[in-house]
Amino acid sequence: MDGPTTRSPDRPAAVHGRTPPSPESPAAVRARERRSRRYRRDLRWSPYLYIAPFFLFFAAFGLFPLLYTGWAALHRVELTAPTDMEWAGLRNFTRLLGDDFFWNALGNTFVIGVLSTVPQLLMALGLAHLLNYRLRGSMFFRVALLTPYATSVAAATLVFVLLFGRDYGLVNWLLSTVGADGVDWENGSWSAKLAVSTIVVWRWTGYNALIYLAAMQAIPHDLYESAALDGASRWQQFRYVTVPSLRPTILFTCVVSTIGATQLFGEPLLFSGSAGASGGADHQYQTLGLYLYEQGWVNLHLGRASAIAWTMFLILLVIAAVNALIARRLRTSQ
C-alpha cells in the first residue's frame, strides 16, 4: 500500500479541484487600469459628443444669424453695400414704431391670425373627435388629412387664387347661384384677409387634427365608462371629459398656430402676383413677413429689415411667456 503523496513546495495547492489563478504581471495591471480610465472617460464625455452636432448647427444657422441680425438692426446698412455699416443705435426701431405701414402690417397679421387660427382649431377638434371612433378606413382618412399639409405653399396658393378669382372664380360662381353679387377677393380689405386665412385653414387643419387625435387616444377609457355610467351623453362626454383632458394640447396648438400666423409669408406673397410684397394695392393684407421682405429686399434697407425681424422675435418671446404662464396655471389648477 502506497503512502501519502507529498506536495511539491513550489506548486500551489488546488482549491476545490481548481488551480488558483496566477498573479497578474505589472504590465497587465497597468493595461487594465488604462482601459478602465478610458471607459470612464468615454462614459463621461460621449453624451456631449453625441449632442455636439446639434449645437454646432444651431450655433451656425440659429444663434449666429440671430445675433448678427441684432447687430445689423443697430446700424444703417443697405443691401447694395452690406459691408458699409454706419452706427444708428435705436434709430431703426424708433423709425419703425413711427411707420404707419408697420402698424398696418401688425394689424393685418393679427386679423389674419385670428381668422385662420380659431376656425382651424375648432374644425381640427371636430375632425379628431370623429376619427377617434372606430371608422372603417380610418387610416385612409388620417392620410387624407395630411395631404394639404404636404402640399407646397405655392401650389396651394395658386389653386386658391383661381378659386377666388373675381371674374371666373368658383367661389363667386357659387355666390351667383344663390343670387349674391361677386366679391373682389384680392382688392377688398376684409375679403382679402378672409381669402388668405382660408388658405392657412385648409393647409393646417388636418395637421392639428392628427395632434388632437393622438392626444384623445391617450385619454384613459375608464373616464368615458364612468361618465357613461353616470348617464352622460356623447356630447357631455366630449364636453366634460375630452376637452378638459386636451387643455395642454389645445394650448400647444394655439401657441404654434399663433407663431405660424406671426411668420406668415408665402400665402399673402403669392395671393396676388402683381402686388408682390406690398400685400395688395392698399397694403390690405401685408403681414409682418411681407413688410420685412419689402424693406430688406425691395427697398434694400437691411438695417430696417433687421429691426423688423427682431421686433417679430420679441413678439414671439411675449407669446412664449404667456404660454408658459397659462401652462403653469393649468398645472396648478389640476
Image (cartoon, rainbow, N blue to C red):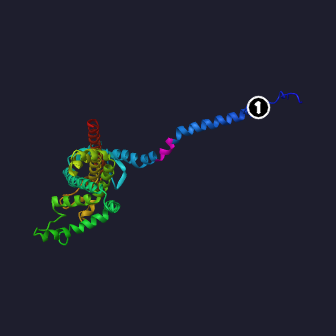
Q: Position of residue 242 (x, y in %)?
A: 26, 48
**Which residue is farthest right?**
1
Q: Quick one: 131 or 83, which is closer to the camera?
A: 131
* Mark 1, residue position: 14
Residue pushed farthest bottom?
168
Relative placement, left or right, of 64 versus 44 is: left
Of residue 214 and residue 321, the one placed in the foreground of this image is: 214
Q: Is residue 173 magenta?
A: no
Residue 37 visible to the viewer: yes
What residue range appears in magenta? Answer: 47-53
**Secondary structure of the residue carrying numbered label 1:** loop
| Closest to the observer, 200 or 174 | 174
Q: x and y percent of residue 155 in the render? A: 31, 65
- What amino acid type is highlighted by mark number 1? Ala
Tell whether position 52 is magenta: yes
Observer-nearest of 172 and 29: 29
Residue extending furthest front?
A: 1
Q: Quadrant of residue 144?
A: bottom left
For the C terminus, which image quadrant? Answer: top left
In the picture, measured across the screen, residue 93 lies left or right of residue 28, that is left
Numbered marks: total: 1
Asked if 2 appears above or below 73 in the picture, the reply is above
**Overall secondary structure of the magenta stretch?**
helix
Q: Quadrant of the N terminus?
A: top right
Horizontal placement of 77 versus 27: left or right? left
